[in-house]
Amino acid sequence: MPAAAHRDRAEAEREARAFARTLKERIDEIADKYIRPDEGTYDFALMYIPAENVYYEAVLRAEDPGDAKSVLGHALRRRVIPVSPHTFYAYLLVILHGLKGMRVEQQAREIQEQLGGLRQQFEAFWTAFQTVGAHLANAQKRFEESERHAGRVQERFERIAGADDGADPGEPGRVRDGSG
């Protein structure tokens, strides 16, 4: 191998390492600046790489994503997702669908809580309804017993009063005063 080719290869490797180092520094900056869940941010960030060829060199070319030393491995470990012009929209759609799913989940929890409260209210109503029903049934029973008892008393009164024309048979216990 000629010396010039060796120098060119060494220079290319040095530049590749410097490029990877610079990308990792940008990843760290993004992670430190934008990923702050305790301040209300999400626990990930997107790193937009505006040129497809740079994205390809930075993320995909000759790197194993599982390798912790790779740019992509470092980015994923820091929860920074590199995106390109072609992948950016797809990532945004995935995030949007995830957020919609979280909203639906939250609404479902709220509905379940409201249904639980409604169940408690209905159970309290049903208990009161049953109590009122029992009272009405008892009142009806007492009314019927009283009606039977009044009938027996009236019959007895009529037997005792018998031939007395002064009794008003329509009203038990009331005697006409004779002035009518």
Image (cartoon, rainbow, N blue to C red):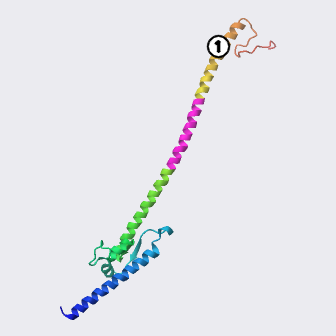
Q: Quadrant of residue 146?
A: top right
| Residue 169 drawn above or below residue 129 | above
Task: Decide which of 94, 80 is in the foreground and name it.
Answer: 80
Q: Position of residue 78 (x, y in %)?
A: 39, 72
Residue 149 placement, left or right of 174: left
Q: Position of residue 115 (x, y in %)?
A: 50, 48
- Residue at 71%, 7% (x, y): give it: 160
Provide the secondary structure element on which disc 1 rests. Answer: helix
Task: Decide which of 44, 53 is in the foreground and name it.
Answer: 44
| Residue 145 drawn above or below residue 156 | below
Task: Decide which of 29, 99 is in the foreground and name it.
Answer: 29
Residue type for callout 1: Arg
Decide whether the magenta segment is chiefly helix, strand or loop.
Answer: helix
Residue 151 placement, left or right of 73: right
Q: Which residues are magenta?
A: 114-135
Q: Quadrant of residue 169?
A: top right
- Residue at 33%, 77% (x, y): give it: 71
- Residue at 28%, 88% (x, y): give it: 12
Residue 39 placement, left or right of 141: left
| Residue 67 drawn above or below residue 116 | below
Q: Magenta segment: does it hold 137? A: no
Q: Position of residue 179 (x, y in %)?
A: 82, 13
* Residue, far top: 163
For the C terminus, the quadrant is top right
Q: What is the crowding at mark 1: few (fewer than 14 residues within 10 Å), some, or many (at least 20)?
A: few
- Residue at 56%, 40% (x, y): give it: 125
Q: Which residue has dot 1 on it?
A: 152
